[in-house]
Image (tube, rainbow, N blue to C red):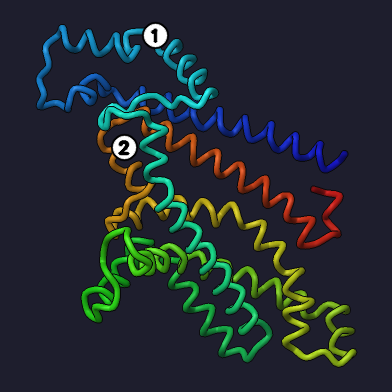
C-alpha cells in the first residue's frame, strides 16, 4: 500500500508539473507582444487585409479573452488535442509524432553511451594510482565545461572534415547518429564519472567490501558484484540531470548536425512564433520528464532493496 500511495502522489505531482509548465509557457508566449495572426498569414511581409486578419483571428479563437483561450487550450490538451500549427498548418500532435522517433533514437543512444562509459571509467579509475585519478579528473573537467555546440564542432572538424570517416549531417543510416550521440553524451559522461567514482571510492572502504576481499574474491568481482550495485543509487538520483541535459542538448545537436527531431522543430517553432507548436513540445517534454522520474523512483527498490520502503 505504501508503494501504491507513493506512486499516486508522484502522479499527482506530475499533473501539477504539467499544468505549471504549460501555464508558464502559455503566458510567456502571449506576453511577447507579437500578433500570432501575422505568423499564421505568412509573416510581416504578407501584408494581409483587415478582413483577412479578422477572419483568421475568429477562426483560431484569438478574438476571445486570454483567459478563455487558456481554458480552451487546457481542455483540448487534456483530450489530446494540441491545436493547429500556425506555420505548418497541420495538427501539432501530428507534427510532433513525425519528428519524435529521431530524437528518441538520439537520446536512447546517448543514454547508453553515457552510462556505459561512465560506469567503465569509474570502475577503472576508482582507488587507482593518484596520477590516473588526476588525469581522468582533469579531462572530465574540461569536457563537462565545454558547451555541446563546441564539442559537436570539434567532432565535425576531426571526423567529418579532416578524416572523412563520418557524415556531417543527415538522419538516415547509423553513421549519421554517431557524432551527434558523442556530442550529446560526452559532457554527461564527464559528470557521471566524477560522481560515480567518488561513490565507489567511499564504498570500497566499507566493511562488507573488506569481508568480500577476505573471502578470496577477485578485485573485478568485488567492484562489479558488490561495490557497483550500491554506487548506482547516485546515478539514478542524477537521472533528472541526465534527461534535462539530453533534451536540452538535442536542440543544439540536431540543429548543428542538421538532423530531424523535436529539438530542431522547437527551434524553428520558437523563431517563427508558432505558439501551439512550442506549447505542444513543452508539454511533451514535461510529460516525458514526469514519466522518467516516476520510473526512477521505482528502480530505487530494484537497485537497493534497503530503500524499498521509501519508494
Write down the residue under mark 1: 65
Q: Residues within 10 Å of mark 2 (few under 14, many from 20)?
A: some
Viewer-proximal residue, 102 or 132?
Answer: 102
Q: Quadrant of residue 12?
A: top right
Write down the residue under mark 2: 270
- State whether residue 269 is above or below residue 229: above
Q: Is residue 298 left or right of residue 238?
A: right
Residue 22 horizontal/vertical position (percent)? 49, 29
Question: Mark 1: which secondary structure?
Answer: loop
Viewer-proximal residue, 60 or 190?
Answer: 60
What residue appears at the point 35 percent right and 41 percent down from the top-left corner?
Answer: 266
Viewer-proximal residue, 138 or 276?
Answer: 276
Q: Is residue 7 left or right of residue 235?
A: right
Residue 115 horizontal/vertical position (percent)? 57, 68
Q: Which mark is residue 121?
A: none
Q: CA distance from mark 1 to mark 2?
A: 23 Å
Q: Is residue 81 left or right of residue 304?
A: left
What residue appears at the point 32 percent right and 51 percent down from the top-left corner?
Answer: 260
Viewer-proximal residue, 224 or 205?
Answer: 224
Total marks placed: 2
N-term mark: 1 or 2: 1
The quarter of the rendered structure image containing the N terminus is top right
Q: Residues within 10 Å of mark 1 (few under 14, many from 20)?
A: few
What residue appears at the point 32 percent right and 72 percent down from the top-left corner?
Answer: 155
Q: Quadrant of residue 13?
A: top right
Amino acid at each position: 500500500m505504501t508503494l501504491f500511495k507513493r506512486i499516486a502522489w508522484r502522479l499527482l505531482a506530475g499533473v501539477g508539473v504539467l499544468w505549471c509548465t504549460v501555464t508558464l509557457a502559455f503566458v510567456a508566449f502571449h506576453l511577447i507582444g507579437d500578433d500570432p495572426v501575422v505568423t499564421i498569414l505568412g509573416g510581416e511581409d504578407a501584408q494581409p487585409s483587415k478582413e483577412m486578419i479578422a477572419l483568421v483571428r475568429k477562426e483560431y479563437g484569438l478574438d476571445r479573452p486570454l483567459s478563455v483561450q487558456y481554458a480552451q487550450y487546457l481542455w483540448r490538451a487534456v483530450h489530446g488535442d494540441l491545436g493547429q500549427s500556425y506555420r505548418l498548418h497541420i495538427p501539432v500532435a501530428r507534427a510532433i509524432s513525425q519528428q519524435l522517433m529521431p530524437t528518441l533514437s538520439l537520446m536512447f543512444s546517448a543514454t547508453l553511451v553515457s552510462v556505459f562509459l561512465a560506469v567503465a571509467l569509474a570502475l577503472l579509475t576508482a582507488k587507482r594510482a593518484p596520477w590516473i585519478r588526476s588525469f581522468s579528473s582533469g579531462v572530465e573537467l574540461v569536457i563537462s565545461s565545454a558547451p555541446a555546440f563546441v564539442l559537436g564542432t570539434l567532432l565535425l572538424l576531426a571526423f567529418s572534415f579532416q578524416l572523412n570517416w563520418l557524415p556531417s549531417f543527415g538522419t538516415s543510416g547509423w553513421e549519421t547518429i554517431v557524432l551527434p550521440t558523442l556530442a550529446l553524451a560526452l559532457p554527461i559522461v564527464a559528470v557521471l564519472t566524477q560522481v560515480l567514482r567518488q561513490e565507489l571510492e567511499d564504498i570500497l572502504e566499507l566493511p562488507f567490501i573488506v569481508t568480500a576481499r577476505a573471502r578470496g574474491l577477485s578485485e573485478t568481482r568485488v567492484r562489479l558484484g558488490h561495490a557497483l550495485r550500491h554506487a548506482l543509487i547516485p546515478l539514478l538520483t542524477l537521472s533528472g540531470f541526465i534527461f534535462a541535459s539530453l533534451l536540452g542538448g538535442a536542440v543544439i545537436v540536431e540543429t548543428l548536425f542538421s538532423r530531424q527531431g523535436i529539438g530542431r522543430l522547437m527551434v524553428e517553432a520558437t523563431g517563427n512564433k508558432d505558439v501551439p507548436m512550442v506549447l505542444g513540445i513543452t508539454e511533451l517534454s514535461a510529460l516525458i520528464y514526469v514519466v522518467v522520474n516516476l520510473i526512477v523512483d521505482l528502480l530505487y527498490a530494484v537497485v537497493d532493496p534497503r530503500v524499498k520502503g521509501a519508494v
